[in-house]
Image: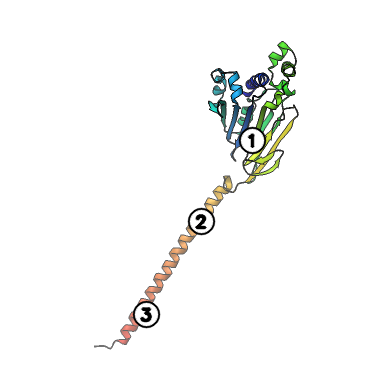
Amino acid sequence: MPLRRLLPLVGALILLLSACRVDVRIDVTADDTGAGNIAVTVDLDAEAVALVPGLAEDLRIDDLISSGWVIEGPTQINSGGLRVILRYAFESPAEATAAMRQISGPNGPLLNPELKRTIDGRTVSTTLDATLQFVGGIEAFSDPTLSATIGAAPWAATAEKLGVDPTQSVGVTLVAHLPGDIKKSTGTEAEGGVIWTAPNDGTAVAVVIGTAESKVDGGFWQILAKVIGYILGLWLIIIGILILLVVFARRRRTARSTTRASNRATPDA
């Protein structure tokens, strides 16, 4: 179930009961080769699960599985809550970009994500750019077809009637772990990476992170290091052989000198 399909459900749940809590966490992890994985963790509290008792059985994930996503759960957490984890392993930044764009609809919360990797000499640079935003505030949780059918502001009108603030019941967090040292960032450094939280009032947060890592063990430099190692090793072997030859030669000379001196000191019979 992509995140774009989850948001209308989230909106309905938090309107039905203001005590509901739904948290979505998106983890993006990449290594210096450009490969890595994406994990989307969706946690619904016990109140939300109680409102929709058949939620676990109603999840539609066949399309995600066919797209390469791996689903873990639903599993029970926190005395009645529910957790679903969606994972995607990517082999390149372009593949990661395409996968990230699958988990968010036109209303957010993750807009225009893009992962890039560049190489300049021995330096590998990795960047992640995106925007965290619920476009239209609470309307972001509505399905466009539903809005067109029953009105432009179905969730806002219902929330006003119920006297609840549904935007305070959902949280979306993005966490990025990129290789190397952090050179620029608009987020908060924590958990070995950088974290951003999507505002619930519809304002935008710019997601920017750039890292750099110097590599001395890859490509040309790896080959050069191996060649130099082989040359040094061969040189040490040759030097060792020469030293042994010199030692043996000196021992032979010493032995000959000793024999001659002994013969001279011994009188003829």
Q: Amino acid at mark 3?
A: Ser
Please tell me whether mark 2 sits on a helix, a strand or a loop. helix
Quote the CA–CA distance across marks 2 and 1.
46 Å
Left or right, 113 with respect to 237, comes to right
Residue at mark 2: 231
Residue 221, image x, y percentages: 58, 48
Residue 104, image x, y percentages: 66, 25
Which residue is situated farthest in the top direction here?
A: 149
Please tell me whether mark 1 sits on a helix, a strand or a loop. strand
Residue at mark 3: 257
Residue at mark 1: 175
Q: Quadrant of residue 189?
A: top right
In terms of sequence position, does the residue under pointer 3 or pointer 1 come before the other?
Answer: 1
Left or right, 259 with respect to 101, comes to left
Q: Amino acid at mark 2?
A: Ile
- Tell me the residue at 35%/76% (across/down): 255
